[in-house]
Every structure is written in C-alpha cells, then in structure tokens.
Amino acid sequence: MDVRGTSGVVGCGANVQGMTLAPRAPEERPNPAIVYIGGLQSPRSREAVRGRLNRVARFFRAGTTAATFPWHELQYEDMQRLRGHLAESCAHTTANYILTSVRKTMRAAWRLGLIDGDHFERVTDVERVRGESPPAGRALSLDEVRALIDAAKSDSRRWRGKRDAALVVLLYCAGIRRAEVAGLELDDLVEENGRVFLDVLGKGNKRRRVPLPREAKPIVDEWLDVRGRKAGPLFPGRSRRGQDVRGRPMRGTSVWKIVVKLVKRAGIEHVNPHFFRYTFISTLLDESGDVSAIQKLAGHANVTTTLRYDRRGERAKEQAVDKLPMPFGRPDEET
C-alpha cells in the first residue's frame, strides 16, 4: 500500500491536511462502512459513527468520506499510524471510539468478502489507547432536585409547569434516558396495587419495567389531569395547553432544553438530563447495594456499565470503611 507521511488530528476538531493513501481507481463493490452504519439501530449512533469514519477517511485520503473510502485497502501499518496520531492528539476515550468504529468496519469488509480472515486479523490487531480521565457528570443533591421541581411549578403557564414537573420526577425516580422519557406513551404507565410502573423501551428495543416511588404518583397525576387520559404520547411534541396528544412525542433534544431552562430558573449548578441517571444509580447503590437489581432497573447489559455510573466518590469510600468491624473498639465507644 502506498502510504505517505501524515499530518493533522483525527476526530478532535483540528484541520486535516495532506493524504496518506494514494488515490486508486474506484471499484464496483459494496462499501463496508455503509453496511456497518446501516446496521446500527439508533439514529444517534449512526450519526456519531459516520462522523468518526468520515474523519478517518479524510485522514488517509483527502476529499473522501466513509462512503467512498476503500476500506479494504487498509493495512496493519496504517492502523498503527492512525493509533499513534490519536494517542497524541485525542482523549483516550475519543481515540478508542474511533478505533472501534474502524475495527467494526473492517469486520464488515471481511463479512462482505472484501478481505480474507488473515487480513482482518492483522489490520485489527492494534492495542487500545490507554488513559484515565475523571468521570463525566455528577449526582444531584436532594435540594437540587427539589429546586428543579419548584422551578417547573413556577412556570407562568400552569399546564407547562405540571408537564415539566412530571418530566423531572420521571427522570429522577426512574433513572431513564432522555430519549426513553421522551418516547413514553400513556399506555407505558401501568398501575398495579396502588403503585405506578413504567414500561420503558430502551436501547436495542428492549423493554424493562421500572417501579416508581409512591410519592411520585401525585405529580404524574397532576400532569395527566391536564393532558387527559387519551392514548398517545405521554409528553406530546406539539400541544395546545398540554391537551393535544396527536402526532409525534417530544424529542430527546426538547427534554434537554427543558432541563437547561429549569436549571437556569432554579439558579443551580449545570445539570443535563443524564445527571438524573447518575443520581438514580448512585443513590440506589448507597441505599440498597443490590447491583444486579440496579442493573436491571437501569437497562444495562452488564453490571460493569452500571458501576461506571457511580458518582458517590469519597463519600462511598468513607461509608464502606466505617462498616469495617473493629476488633479493638472505636474511639467514641465507652470503656
């Protein structure tokens, strides 16, 4: 493969100059990047992966995109050079996301018969970029959650205030993602024995049932009294005084904007919708410690992912140490 010197940064917002792969005549064969991207279920995932692969394509050959780059021509030395640039210029998490996208594209190339097994093994035999960074986001305090609900209720339009209060309560009490809360239908609220459950459609089209605390029901009911009990989106994207439930549900971006608006009104530190998820998981880890149950409530595929949402920090360490049995007694114990 004709590979020249590289310059520029891939995937980190910098301009990329020059080419590292010599242009070759186009061939009539399926593009593995398009096949890989097309198999992703989430529109957000498709957009993110396409952006990463577009940057990689431009890094190797200026003017190309993920859809036009000849992925089957990549060799091990090219991947090593790519990894080196990413390690020097990107956060390790960003670098590994990009490398993973390329690996999966090459797997698609192998499955399409564009490369053989040996080629696939060689080109993907590249180590991950190592590094460590502080976890993103934080857990909210109870006072902050209360301030956001109060900010919602203070809205001059009472119907909107009740809607936003119900939105905050569901984010906090169920720990669901913004896309999940936006996509809720009225039928996803299920009441059994005086308790309300949410039937949540999560990633991978997997459904899970999340029980709500009994104290959440009155605030949800206040919104339903305005919205009405007609089938349709729980939070309509477009509504007149909260009562028009026809059409599409609210978008995830709208949930983000509502939370940002309430944060500003409440005068608290930066919060985005995902912080409620950190709060939900961290609080349950504190109160119950049942990681398996919390994993199922959060809709995670494995416990490791759930533990990455732990934002208890030093407080959790202190509480854990305080539970350690002492064979010699504690200073505050009477002798």
Image: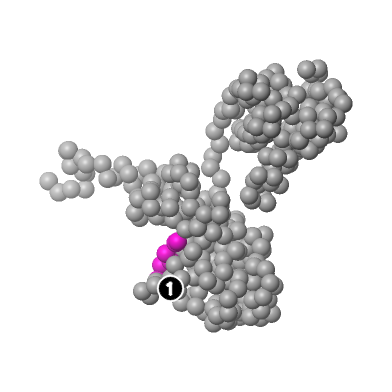
**Vertical relation: 220 (above or below) 264:** below
Q: Is residue 200 left or right of residue 238?
A: left
Percent coordinates x, y for residue 47 in the rendering: 71, 47
The one of 71 and 317 positioned closer to us in this rendering? 71
Picture quadrant of residue 68: top right
Residue in view at x 69 percent, y 42 percent = 37
Residue in view at x 78 percent, y 29 percent = 70
Coloration of the structure image: one colour
Q: Amino acid at mark 1?
A: Glu
The one of 250 and 95 positioned closer to us in this rendering? 250
The one of 299 and 95 positioned closer to us in this rendering? 299
**Vertical relation: 139 (above or below) 307:** below
**Vertical relation: 164 (above or below) 243:** above
User: Could you tell me if residue 298 is visible in this image?
Assistant: yes
Percent coordinates x, y for residue 266 in the rendering: 58, 66
Picture quadrant of residue 29: top right
Q: Which residue is mark 1?
A: 191
Q: Secondary structure at mark 1?
A: strand
Q: Is residue 139 left or right of residue 45?
A: left
Residue 236, magenta (yes or no): no
Q: Is residue 325 left or right of residue 66?
A: left
Percent coordinates x, y for residue 41 in the rendering: 63, 49
The one of 13 and 235 positioned closer to us in this rendering? 235
User: Could you tell me if residue 264 is visible in this image?
Assistant: no
Span shown in magenta: 209-214
Percent coordinates x, y for residue 262 in the rendering: 61, 66
Residue in view at x 42 percent, y 64 percent = 211
Q: Is residue 83 left or right of residue 217?
A: right
